[in-house]
Image (cartoon, coloured by chain):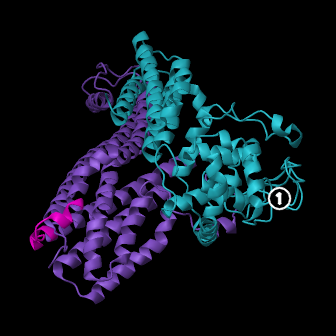
Chain colours: A purple, B cyan
């Protein structure tokens, strides 16, 4: 019931279409809506591609955990090689949804621009073709909405049919947009989880290196004051502290430990090398963090775009009339 | 009331903050740091998976998240008592979150889950094999209201994720077309017993290949009482039997006339019960339910009590068939019921 209530504002204008006056949807509105749909589908594709890449990364993480010592397969199975790994069903479902939105956008544009029956026939054939493959995604949350929308479009082989398809498809488009919007927290969780794991690995390696630096430094005496090595050591201490602070802002400042063995310039070089490796890892960590922040921002823009498209969809329906959208 | 996203985000953030502080704490032995690192990885992994899976799967994955925290709690580090307290609270939050997720998605299971959240993963309620023929009318009736709580979640999740195998689409469509073709005969038998026509249709397809000359019990010919399990059916009347009389007997024998949960999970439970729960011993999704879908690859009983791990079912599973009927719009599906 709650779901029905949610759709009433969107469905009501469609239900009232036959009762509305003869004013039809202005061309500007349909064009603007089609442009928004362009943007939504492009952004969706980009997000789905990102997500597919993230999933691959996750699977790669999982695969490496099953490998013990040998990091390559010890046997070759031609049957496995012949099998093309199917795409993750969830991703395939979202791709189909975006394809269906594309078709709907094409239908709206065709209606607003007054395409001839040949062009409509072409669009309908494309929809029918999609319908024939959309069963692959059957059973996914979007499956029925996609099938319904594509079926409507496949039936639209003349102008009247097209107008009917646009009106009838609107609720499904709204539902798909809803699902795409609702999926954003999931997409974000996947990205944060996968990137977070990479960050955890990098943080662990940096801590291990810092521990090693402490161990090495703790075996040798510091350089004599006033020597070039002493100046280098001071820089090293400052950089180590800066890295510690970056990893854990609460870390109390402390000097590197010192030992009883005589100072050795080679040892100091080893310390500097270790620190450079740790700093490189920290740069990678910062890049991952920036990546997550950028993705967060991207999702924000995506949700706003979806909301705007949904508003336009409602407005378009309100403005259309029983005869449908005219060029 | 906070949302699932907010809850899971809060639990994750708290655990991440605590574990990160532990990872960077000075003076931690390398072995301990490695253990914290592993816990962190599991935490991130669990969080990522909550985005991938459905709500039901998310709930299960949260268990992994809780376990990840448990592993830290079970072997306390050089952490302050406050650390342990915060972590214990995070584990408890994860458990409550798990319950809430399950309760919202599967309201009927809430009472059972509230008693013991760990029952989600418990497989102790798998019923015994189907009653033997000798038990006849005296066999113990199966639960007459709902499928076991743990299986409801499993069935609904698997059904939601069921994808028809592209290479079997034509065959599945053939099955669906045949079920629709005989819909009125199934409805005539099922109507009086409150058993949906599509449920009977799937059993008919699997037990006797849509033949109306065989018993619905097991496909034995109607010219005599059944010989295979369950044997000697129907008890009343004399052969040859009409298909309708035999079908009604089969449904009553399975106590389906006393079953009123025709939700996805209720139907799938009864189908699996019809064929038997033996596949669970072999950790193979029952082909009686899932054959021709993404859930099933191989392994089947080639005859009574003989399981062959390499054999592949060549029939369309009942759940796969239902999935196709729902996809085609022939059968409607709401959260509560399939109708």
Q: Is residue A306 visible?
A: no
A208 or B248, nearer to the observer? B248
Residue B80: image location, x then y, percent:
42, 12
Q: Is residue A213 left or right of residue A26?
A: right
Subunit that carries the residue with mark 1? B
Q: Is residue A21 magenta?
A: yes
Residue A152: image location, x then y, percent:
36, 71
Read off the magenta span. A15-30
Compared with B40, B213 (above or below) is below
Residue denoted by label 1: B241
A238 or B242, nearer to the observer? B242
Q: Secondary structure at mark 1?
A: loop
Q: Is residue A214 left or right of residue B75?
A: left
Please name the residue shown 64% across and 66% down the image.
B182
Q: Is residue B240 left or right of residue A152?
A: right
Quarter holding the N terminus of chain B?
A: top left
């Amino acid at each position: 019931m709650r779901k029905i209530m949610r759709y009433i504002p969107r469905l009501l204008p469609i239900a009232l279409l036959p009762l509305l006056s003869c004013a039809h949807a202005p061309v500007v509105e349909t064009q603007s809506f089609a442009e928004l749909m362009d943007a939504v589908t492009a952004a969706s594709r980009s997000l789905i591609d990102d997500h597919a890449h993230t999933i691959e990364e996750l699977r790669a993480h999982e695969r490496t955990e099953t490998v013990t010592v040998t990091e390559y397969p010890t046997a070759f199975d031609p049957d496995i090689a012949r099998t093309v790994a199917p795409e993750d069903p969830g991703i395939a479902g979202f791709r189909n949804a975006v394809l269906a939105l594309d078709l709907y956008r094409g239908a709206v544009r065709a209606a607003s621009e007054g395409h001839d029956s040949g062009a409509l026939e072409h669009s309908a054939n494309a929809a029918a073709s999609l319908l024939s493959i959309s069963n692959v995604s059957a059973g996914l949350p979007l499956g029925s909405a996609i099938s319904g929308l594509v079926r409507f479009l496949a039936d639209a082989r003349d102008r009247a049919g097209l107008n009917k398809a646009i009106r009838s498809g609107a609720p499904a488009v709204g539902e798909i947009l809803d699902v795409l919007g609702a999926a954003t927290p999931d997409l974000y969780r996947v990205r944060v989880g996968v990137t977070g794991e990479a960050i955890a690995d990098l943080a662990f390696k940096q801590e291990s290196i810092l521990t090693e630096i402490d161990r090495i430094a703790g075996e040798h005496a510091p350089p004599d004051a006033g020597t070039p090595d002493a100046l280098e050591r001071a820089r090293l201490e400052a950089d180590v502290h800066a890295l510690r602070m970056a990893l854990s802002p609460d870390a109390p400042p402390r000097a590197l430990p010192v030992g009883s063995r005589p100072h050795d310039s080679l040892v100091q070089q080893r310390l500097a090398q270790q620190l450079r490796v740790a700093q490189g890892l920290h740069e990678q960590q910062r890049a991952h963090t920036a990546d997550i922040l950028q993705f967060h921002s991207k999702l924000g823009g995506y949700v706003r775009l979806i909301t705007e498209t949904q508003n336009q969809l409602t407005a378009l329906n309100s403005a259309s009339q029983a005869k449908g959208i005219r060029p | 009331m906070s949302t699932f996203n907010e809850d899971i985000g809060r639990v994750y953030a708290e655990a991440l903050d605590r574990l990160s502080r532990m990872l960077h704490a000075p003076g931690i032995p390398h072995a301990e740091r490695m253990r914290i690192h592993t816990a962190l990885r599991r935490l991130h992994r669990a969080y990522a998976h909550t985005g991938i899976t459905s709500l039901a799967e998310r709930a299960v994955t949260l268990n992994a998240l809780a376990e990840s925290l448990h592993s830290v709690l079970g072997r306390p580090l050089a952490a302050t008592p406050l650390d342990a307290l915060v972590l214990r609270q995070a584990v408890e939050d994860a458990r409550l979150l798990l319950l809430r997720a399950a309760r919202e998605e599967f309201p009927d299971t809430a009472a059972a889950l509230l008693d013991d959240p760990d029952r989600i993963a418990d497989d102790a309620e798998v019923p015994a094999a189907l009653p033997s023929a000798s038990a006849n009318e005296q066999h113990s009736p199966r639960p007459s209201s709902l499928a076991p709580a743990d299986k409801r979640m499993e069935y609904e999740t698997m059904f939601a994720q069921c994808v028809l195998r592209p290479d079997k689409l034509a065959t599945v469509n053939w099955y669906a077309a045949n079920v629709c073709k005989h819909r009125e005969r199934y409805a005539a038998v099922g109507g009086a017993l409150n058993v949906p026509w599509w449920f009977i249709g799937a059993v008919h397809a699997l037990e006797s290949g849509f033949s109306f000359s065989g018993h619905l019990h097991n496909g034995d010919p109607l010219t005599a009482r059944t010989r295979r399990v369950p044997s000697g059916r129907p008890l009343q009347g004399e052969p040859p039997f009409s298909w309708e009389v035999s079908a009604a007997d089969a449904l009553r024998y399975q106590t389906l006339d006393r079953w009123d949960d025709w939700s996805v999970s209720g139907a799938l439970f009864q189908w699996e019960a019809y064929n038997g729960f033996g596949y669970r011993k072999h950790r193979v999704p029952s082909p009686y339910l899932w054959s021709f879908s993404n859930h099933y690859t191989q392994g089947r009983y080639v005859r009574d009590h003989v399981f062959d791990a390499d054999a592949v079912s060549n029939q369309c599973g009942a759940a796969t068939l239902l999935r196709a009927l729902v996809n085609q719009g022939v059968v409607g599906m709401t959260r509560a019921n399939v109708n």
